[in-house]
Image: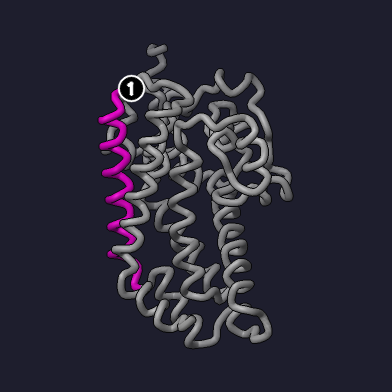
Amino acid sequence: MDWMVINNAIIKYELILRMACFGFVLMGLAYWESRATWRQGVLNQRVRWANHMALGGFSTFLVRMSFPVLALTMAVVAEVQHLGLLNTTTFLPFWLKVVLSLIGMDFAMYMEHRWMHRYKILWRVHQVHHSDTELDVSTGLRFHPIEYFFMMGIKLVAILFLGPPVFAVFIFEVMLISFLLFAHSNIQLSPIVEYYLRFIFVTPNMHRIHHSDIPFEHNKNFGFCFSIWDRMLNSYIAQPHQGDHHLVFGLEIYRLPAFQTLLKLLALPFIKYKAVKNRFAHIK
């Protein structure tokens, strides 16, 4: 197989390929949600979807316009300049380099997610994602532009360190958005599928716990694609304290509808929490 030809095709048609994969996964999961719903939503779903799609699209546009080098281009640079562990290792077969690349980049995203929760300045940005009062596939797009920038920066550093093949980076980019959408989807898996699938991958039931309004629970289950990191690094929780169907999503005062608009989501990291709490203290 001529990987140079495949790499060139991926680089040339990267945006089209990624958009096609994104659209297919998004629509497929949305249909799945309509056929096997985990919990019925109470908000206007069209408004939620419009806000989340606009936020995700705006954030993606800013990243693509602001970064002189994106993930695939960085992989090409690393390959040409022989940068990174895998580019300086000649004895490994290509397929193993791809597997190791996927594992390594997913670990980098796991650590990025933990940092978003650990450091106050990053949490102020990440709370935009956690302030959603419901969970469905569109929540996988609900990230502030600053978080998109931070995620891209971590990916670029990981690529320079690992030296993954271009093909692996493309596969990981597709995996990342696919699992972001899947993990947030409002679907009900059968207990047997859920039990076995989460041994390797992050499932919706596993990730819903991460969106609990209880701090102990939303500081667990940080994984993006693979569930192994949570199990290995003591951040895994199998079930929420009050049971799956009693989960409450959102973050205290930010559950109010006033904080669910596109403009408020963009402004949220810069709003002083104490001032907001005092202003809306009378609202139950």
Tell me: residue 234, above or below residue 4: above
Amino acid type for the residue under numbered disc 1: Leu
- Describe residue 255's horizontal placement relative to residue 206 as left or right: left
The residue sitting at 51% across, 22% down in the picture is 248
Question: Percent position (x, y) of residue 91?
Answer: 68, 84
Q: Main secondary structure of the magenta part?
A: helix
Find numbered disc 1 in the image and state the secondary structure of the residue it sits on: loop
The residue sitting at 57% across, 70% down in the picture is 98
Residue 164: which quarter of the image? Answer: bottom right
Q: Is residue 109 magenta?
A: no
The residue sitting at 39% across, 69% down in the picture is 70
Query: Is any part of residue 274 visible from this angle?
Result: no
Q: If the image is split into quadrants, where does the C terminus sit?
A: top left
Tell me: residue 279, above or below residue 188: above
Question: Percent position (x, y) of residue 103?
Answer: 61, 61
Question: Percent position (x, y) of residue 42?
Answer: 36, 19
Residue 218: which quarter of the image? Answer: top right
Tell me: residue 171, above or below residue 144: below
